[in-house]
């Protein structure tokens, strides 16, 4: 009755017969009836509902359309479901800036429909896009067919209004729009409703490409098709979509309403979609066709017009439903493997299905290695259910051992929470729990999801540790404060929820966006004010060697000259990850103020640092680790320069398209720590869009992993986003893995000069075309002269 007083009599369901539809999501293997279902119609109502539930200590679970496939929207322990289906307004559309603000109950496909007349669309397109909601997409970091080229939900949501567990309303914004502070939006996307509920979202819209070519390639064997996938990517082609269906799926689809005329006697089919401008697209289509035929495709042809193109994609998106013709039930798996390992992993998947005497059908996003094997069974048979569970776990173990992950877009939810230890250590999961507790110390937001239950008691431990406002605590891996000792910025709703960490972090305002020193883990005391450089040098030398410790250094000239760099007392340069961990642990135990450093070009960004005892330099952590062109992935230690990194990739025809302010010294660790982009962010994005994995030394010396080595990964929380742009205030980044891009076959720079007004109009006109420039820059006459272009005084260079 309290909830009905908030949302209205007709907006709360509580009768058992009414709740049946809400006891499961799109994965019917897990069923938990909720205590009630509430339908708020606004952010304010959502906040009031969450406050009431928090006051009563009742857990709650957000739900969109219920299309999820991981059991993520189930209310465990008789919790309440907060259903956002009535919040379905498109609030505003900004054609010029290509954004839309929507309530999160809006159906995905409705966004593109609403902006189609403007020549724009919303890119993420999961198979359920005609039903699934934007809120559900945000919760799961949903992908879809076209995310290979354009990215997943996290790349297309640039702002969100979020209600936290206690009913506080906060606005989170990504650095793509110049928001300063930690990328809280980045870590919120994909958190599966465990951090709070997004009620509004600002979405990035993309021009509809003027040219599209869709190819259908039919292969005698799955193995041939999977080898062709790797070859297409390695050849430097970046399809908008690259999908595979095996023979089992094809026959099911062709017997359904989604029939598209696919051959029934083939082993596999590839659907390859290319898009862009007309110039060159037919040549690229011929390259794809040639590669497919080289790998024994029986045929490869272009779709015969737009009608057939739509029919082919409808067949692909209808594949999950068509599997109902094969068996009464199916368990849909979701894992990602490196593209280069597709042939062996697919062969192993079929071996596993034969071992357990189960029928297997495969339909998946081949271009990014995102597998969706469907294991067919009869849920009325307990033996079938047992074999399905055993086969599912073996499939996950196979994908992980191949360098992959347990989920690429469906999420962990309830279904895969016990698989998380396959890819993350105890320390990794403890770090995730600390971040989760910072958003939701009540543990009422969608409890029992993502983190295994045995680790869940770690969440209680996090909450029972000394509060952040009593000073940084020994052993707290995220216990970081501003070196001035002053409190962080005014995003108080997150800070006050305080048990874990965020109160210790700088959050949100330009004035507070500083390169803070990491302070040690001990509580403040008389000994903290004293630092003996000689004694410190001896202790540091015992870890890294005398030759790698320098007192009173002269730091290199910085790129930024905003604030003077306070001279540090000692610089230590570790030569290994383990040494870096020992250095951080020592600094924490001694209470030393510490600054991570790459090339020292941005140490003075932000507020002046009042006290720096130790600088930890990554200069010796400069190894290029590996590069697999077929996977479009490369890894290196953080001390490698961006220039060297790209020079190494050049032989494979690939690159990391980041161009921050740099005179050749910038390290990849520094680029990620600052999160800075350059002119090319217009076409390619920022570091946050390319980092897929990292290893970090936390202030207490623990070494943790975030992300992985595959281009799609929604297992656990996206801590890569949190560390990217954190300016070294949360830990020392020591290894990085990036997704890459093929190097353009040709680059052209066009120069134009004129008045500022004319140049601005021209720039806007270029932006409004569908030519997809990667950079549009305005340069003053003085700067033009410095880069060797002479223009008339008073003019600008475009």
Image (cartoon, grey):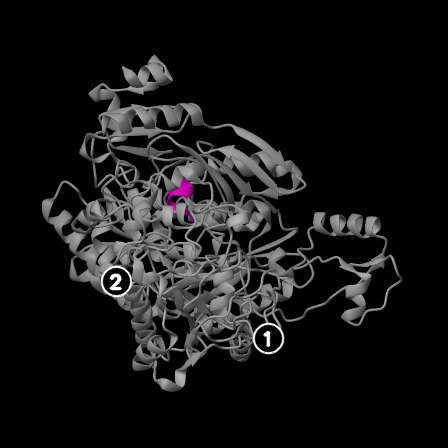
Nearest-to-viewer mark from 2 and 1: 1
- The answer to whether 566 is drawn above or below residue 360 in the figure is below
Q: Is residue 758 left or right of residue 399?
A: right
Residue under pointer 2: 350
Tell whether label 1 touches label 2 (CB within 8 Å).
no
The residue lying toward the viewer, choosing from 106 and 218, is 106
- Vertical placement of 231 versus 675: above or below? below
Q: Residue at x 77, y 70 (%)?
A: 786
Query: From where the camera sits, is residue 100 visible?
Result: yes
Q: What secondary structure is the stretch in magenta mostly built from? A: helix
Measured Cα–Cα span from mark 2 to mark 1: 49 Å
**In terms of secondary structure, where does tag 1 sit?**
loop
Quick one: 465 or 414, which is closer to the camera? Answer: 465
Q: Which mark is residue 664?
A: 1
2 or 1: tag closer to the N-terminus? 2
**Image position, residue 160 (x, y; %):** 48, 39
**Residue numbers of the magenta segment:** 136-143
241 in magenta: no
Q: Is residue 227 found left or right of 70 in the rendered image?
A: right
Is residue 139 on the magenta stretch? yes
Front-lying residue, 451 or 571: 571
Q: Quadrant of residue 660?
A: bottom right
| Residue 659 shown left or right of residue 371 in the figure | right
Q: Looking at this view, is 197 or 63 the one in front? A: 197
* Secondary structure type for disc 2: helix
Q: Give x and y (percent) for residue 43.
A: 44, 27
Residue 266 visible in the shown view: no
């Amino acid at each position: 009755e309290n909830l009905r007083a908030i949302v209205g009599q007709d907006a709360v369901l509580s009768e058992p017969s009414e709740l049946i539809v809400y006891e499961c999501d799109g994965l019917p293997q897990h069923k938990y009836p909720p205590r009630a279902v509430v339908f708020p119609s606004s952010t304010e109502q959502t906040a009031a509902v969450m406050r009431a539930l928090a006051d009563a200590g009742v857990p709650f679970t957000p739900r969109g359309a219920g299309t999820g496939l991981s059991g993520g929207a189930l209310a465990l322990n008789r919790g309440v479901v907060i259903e956002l289906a009535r919040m379905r307004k498109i609030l505003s559309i900004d054609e010029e800036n290509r954004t839309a603000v929507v309530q999160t109950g809006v159906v995905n496909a409705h966004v593109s429909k609403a902006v189609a007349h403007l020549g724009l669309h919303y890119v993420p397109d999961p198979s359920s896009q005609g039903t699934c909601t934007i809120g559900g997409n945000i919760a799961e970091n949903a992908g879809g067919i076209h995310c290979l080229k354009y990215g997943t939900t996290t790349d297309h949501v640039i702002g969100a209004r979020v209600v936290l567990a206690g009913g506080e309303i906060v606005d989170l914004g990504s650095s793509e729009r110049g928001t300063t502070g930690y990328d809280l939006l980045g870590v919120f996307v994909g958190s599966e409703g465990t951090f709070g509920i997004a009620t509004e979202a600002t979405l990035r819209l993309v021009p509809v490409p003027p040219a599209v070519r869709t190819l259908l390639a039919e292969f005698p064997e799955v193995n041939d098709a999977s080898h062709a996938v790797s070859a297409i990517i390695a050849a430097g082609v970046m399809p908008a979509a690259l999908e595979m269906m095996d023979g089992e799926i094809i026959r099911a689809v062709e017997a359904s309403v989604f029939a598209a005329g696919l051959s029934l006697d083939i082993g596999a089919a590839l659907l390859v979609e290319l898009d862009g401008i007309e110039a060159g697209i037919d040549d690229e289509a011929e390259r794809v066709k040639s590669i497919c035929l080289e790998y024994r495709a029986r045929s490869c042809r272009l779709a015969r017009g737009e009608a057939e193109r739509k029919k082919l994609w409808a067949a692909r998106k209808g594949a999950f439903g068509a599997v109902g013709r094969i068996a009464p039930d199916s368990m849909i798996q979701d894992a990602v493997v490196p593209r280069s390992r597709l042939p062996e992993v697919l062969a192993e998947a079929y071996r596993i299905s034969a071992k357990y005497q189960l029928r297997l059908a495969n339909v998946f996003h081949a271009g990014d290695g995102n597998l969706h094997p469907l294991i067919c069974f009869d849920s009325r048979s307990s033996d079938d259910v047992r074999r399905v569970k055993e086969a599912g776990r073996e499939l996950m173990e196979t994908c992980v051992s191949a360098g992959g992950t347990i989920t690429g877009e469906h999420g962990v939810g309830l279904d895969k929470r016990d698989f998380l230890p396959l890819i993350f250590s105890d320390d990794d999961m403890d770090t995730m729990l600390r971040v989760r507790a910072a958003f939701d110390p009540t543990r009422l937001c969608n409890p029992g999801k993502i983190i295994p239950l045995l680790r869940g008691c770690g969440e209680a431990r996090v909450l029972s540790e000394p509060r952040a406002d009593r000073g940084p605590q020994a052993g707290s891996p995220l216990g970081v404060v501003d070196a001035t000792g002053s409190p962080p910025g005014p995003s108080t709703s997150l800070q006050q929820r305080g048990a874990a960490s965020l109160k210790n972090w700088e959050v949100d305002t330009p004035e507070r966006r500083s390169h803070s020193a990491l302070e040690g883990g001990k509580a403040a005391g008389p000994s903290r004010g004293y630092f003996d450089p000689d004694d410190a040098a001896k202790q540091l030398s015992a870890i890294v060697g005398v030759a790698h410790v320098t007192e009173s250094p002269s730091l290199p000239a910085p790129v930024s000259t905003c604030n003077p760099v306070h001279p540090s007392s000692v610089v230590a340069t570790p030569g290994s990850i383990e040494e870096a961990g020992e250095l951080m642990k020592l600094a924490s135990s001694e209470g030393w103020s510490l600054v991570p450093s790459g090339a020292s070009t941005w140490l003075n960004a932000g507020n002046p640092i009042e006290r720096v005892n130790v600088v930890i330099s990554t200069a010796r952590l400069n190894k290029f680790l590996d590069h697999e062109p077929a996977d479009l992935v490369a890894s290196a230690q953080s001390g490698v320069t961006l220039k060297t990194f790209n020079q190494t990739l050049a032989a494979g025809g690939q690159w990391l398209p980041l161009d921050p302010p740099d005179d050749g010294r910038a390290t990849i660790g520094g680029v990620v720590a600052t999160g800075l982009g350059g002119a090319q962010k217009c076409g390619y994005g920022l570091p946050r869009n390319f980092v897929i994995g990292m290893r970090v030394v936390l202030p207490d010396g623990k070494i943790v992993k975030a992300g992985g080595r595959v281009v799609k990964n929604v297992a656990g929380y996206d801590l890569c986003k949190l560390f990217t742009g954190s300016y070294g205030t949360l830990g020392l980044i020591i290894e990085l893995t990036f997704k890459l891009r093929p190097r353009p076959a040709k680059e052209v720079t066009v120069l134009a000069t004129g008045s500022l007004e004319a140049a601005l109009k021209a720039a806007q006109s270029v932006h409004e075309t569908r030519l997809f420039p990667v950079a549009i820059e305005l340069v003053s006459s003085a700067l033009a002269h410095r880069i060797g272009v002479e223009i008339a005084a008073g003019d600008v260079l475009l």
